[in-house]
Image: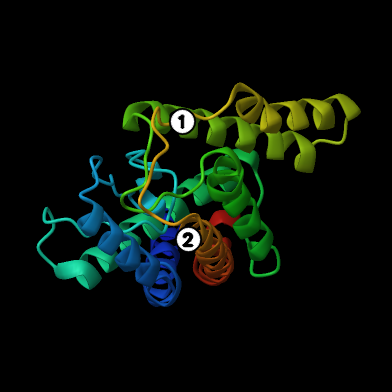
Amino acid sequence: MMVKYLLATIVAGLFAGIILTPAMYMRTVPLILHAEEYEQAGGAEHSHEAAAPAGESAAVAAPQVHEEAAGPELPFGRLGNTLLINLVAGAGFALVTGAAALFIGRKITLQNGIYWGLAGFFIFNFAPAFSLAPELPAMPTADLATRQAWWVITVALTAGGVYFIVLREQIWAKVLGAVLIVAPHVYGAPEAENLTSSVPPTLASEFAVSTLATNLFFWVVLGLALGWFLQTYAESELDA
């Protein structure tokens, strides 16, 4: 029973990870390459710590799905590294979403899959990016561990907030949910001490918008894929 559920979830995540890769190469990768030119030309003091896409939620490597690990550690080249990370990311986020559905007792179907995807985008990407925007190479950043801790806390509080607002009817639950979502932003995200950067503000803004758009696309695909694979291959097993 659970084996089919897990397999369907993982396959949906892998599918979303594959679809994410060309979307990244259309939107975010060209901006990363452009920023790398500024990084090389300016001799940036701070090397950019690439985030692990979606699936790194497990390793909490970084808050954004789209950032590309194109460093020398992986031997498959920029495209191969990106695809590999996206596969791991997709599977990881799919497992997290599938586990959440089981925990709260709600099925993911083709009809409601897009809503699960939108919730995932809001929790893992949009809410954290509100105070901690995606960063390009050569952009100043706060300490990595501090950013990761803030991101994890923000995701956890936002997930709780979405649960109380969407799935509970009581007024106190709605108020508590709003407080949980707003709390980490009132506290504030970690900021770099020196905000000087060789990257033009317009490029940074374009990257932030493109990253969010790419992540939204990823989560919509993931939600619909989860709905289809779970409804087709696992729903009857769970009902048995």
Q: Can residue 1 be seen in the rendering of this structure?
A: no
Q: Which residue does the image show at 63% across and 56% down from the upper left? A: 116
Q: Which residue is mark 1?
A: 191
Residue 193 point in image, percent of width and height? 40, 27
Q: Amino acid at mark 2?
A: Phe
Left or right: residue 213 compared with residue 115 = left
| Rendered residue at 30%/67% (across/down) | 33
Q: Quadrant of the C terminus?
A: bottom right
* Residue 154: % across, % down: 55, 32
Residue ID at (46%, 61%): 203
Element marked by disc 2:
helix
Residue type of the residue flagged with mark 1: Glu
Towards the viewer: 115 or 36: 36
**Residue position for label 2:** 207
User: In the rendered image, which quarter is residue 200 located in?
Assistant: bottom left
Is 12 above or below relative to 155? below
Q: Which mark is residue 158?
A: none
Q: Quadrant of the N terminus?
A: bottom left
Name the colour scheme: rainbow
Q: Nearer the viewer, residue 141 or 61?
A: 141
Residues 142 and 24: in front is 142
- Judge from the rendering whether residue 13 lies leftward or rightward of residue 76; answer left or right: right
